[in-house]
Image (tube, rainbow, N blue to C red):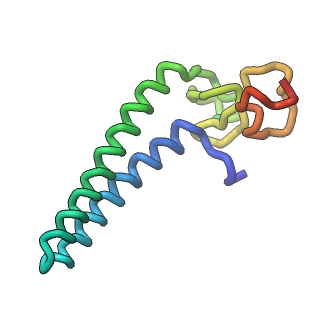
Amino acid sequence: MAKYSNKINKIRTFALSLIFIGFIVMYLGIFFRNSALLMTIFMLLGMLCILASTGVYFWIGMLSTKTVQVVCPNCGKHTKMLGRVDMCMYCNEPLTLDPKLEGVEFDEKYNKKNTKQS
Ligand SMILES: [Zn+2]
């Protein structure tokens, strides 16, 4: 079950790790302080990662407008889902908006529009 997690949470984790990578890359630049060029490259790369994460956070904001709020049947909490199938943010219970898929084993491929299932 650990293979799947809530999409919004996944993207948020990605954005957060981008910030960390950015800081690590900038920190590594300090070790190259003898070379102004290398240090500048590392600083720029770090800045790019942080800028990218800002972009991802903005993207989450856009996606949030498309999410559907549902009450999880397993833990009873309000969770946000994206697409036809998603996982509960709290207990990773598979959720679906499509009655046809209810009871069907959870598979992220149902989110893709061009599957033979649909
Ligand atoms: Zn739940």
| Location of residue 2 (image quadrant) | bottom right
Quadrant of the image where one finds ligand 1 = top right
Residue at 46 percent across and 49 percent down: it is 14
Q: Is residue 57 above or below residue 1?
A: above
Q: Quadrant of residue 115?
A: top right
Split into 4 quadrants, where in the image is the C terminus? top right
Question: Which residue is drawn at the image coordinates 48% and 19% (left, top)?
Answer: 65
Q: Is residue 14 above or below residue 87?
A: below
Question: What percent of the width, then of the height, locates residue 102?
Answer: 83, 27
Relative side of 25 to 74, left or right: left
Up/down of 81 relative to 16, above or below? above
* Coordinates of residue 105 in the picture (x, y in percent): 85, 39
Numbered label tally: 0
Q: Residue at x 20, y 78 (%)?
A: 31
- Toward the front, the furthest residue is 37
Left or right of residue 71: residue 18: left
Residue 13 placement (x, y as % from top left): 46, 48
Question: Of 14 and 42, which appears nearest the observer?
Answer: 42
**Residue 27 falls left or right of residue 56:** left
Rendered residue at 87%/29% (across/down): 116
Q: Quadrant of residue 29?
A: bottom left
